[in-house]
Amino acid sequence: MGLQLRTVASAMDTSLEDAWTALAQRLWLSDNPAQKLKPETLKADIWDALEADRFSLRALAILENLQILEKYIRARFTGNATSG
């Protein structure tokens, strides 16, 4: 009888994924593609959350899967944005 390895997502991993998925649905996966990128939203909802999680590979992988760069940041970036 061979050894079988199963990966079981912990409750913390699942809640982290759910939180990022909910944010993605609200900000960039919704049917409102014209929504502009707001620096305060990027800072408060994304950067601060990643920083609090110490930029974990799990969180970054989830955001990559949700296509944050392609569908949210790059798609909504305007050249006249300031770094206030």
Image (tube, grey):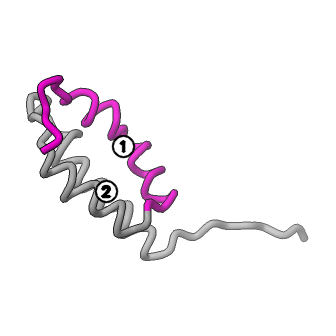
Whether the residues at callouts 1 and 2 have beta carbons within 8 Å, the answer is: yes
Q: How many marks?
A: 2
Q: Residue at x 26, y 35 (%)?
A: 73
Indicate the position of residue 4 as horizontal and vertical percent values. Answer: 78, 67
- Residue closest to the eye, 9 or 56: 56
- Residue closest to the eye, 2 or 52: 52
Amino acid type, callout 2: Trp
Indicate the position of residue 58 as horizontal and vertical percent values. Answer: 49, 59
Q: State which quarter of the image contains the C terminus.
A: top left
Give the vertical position of 42 relative to 82 (above or below). below
Magenta stretch: give its range.
55-84
Mark 1 neighbour density, 10 Å: few (under 14) some (14–19) many (20 or more)? some
Indicate the position of residue 49 as horizontal and vertical percent values. Answer: 30, 63
Numbered tag placed on residue 32 in the rendering:
none
* Secondary structure beneath label 1: loop
Q: Which residue is mark 2?
A: 20
Q: CA distance from mark 1 to mark 2?
A: 8 Å
Q: Residue at x 21, y 47 (%)?
A: 25
Q: Which residue is mark 1?
A: 66
Give the vertical position of 77 relative to 18 (above or below). above
Amino acid type, callout 1: Leu
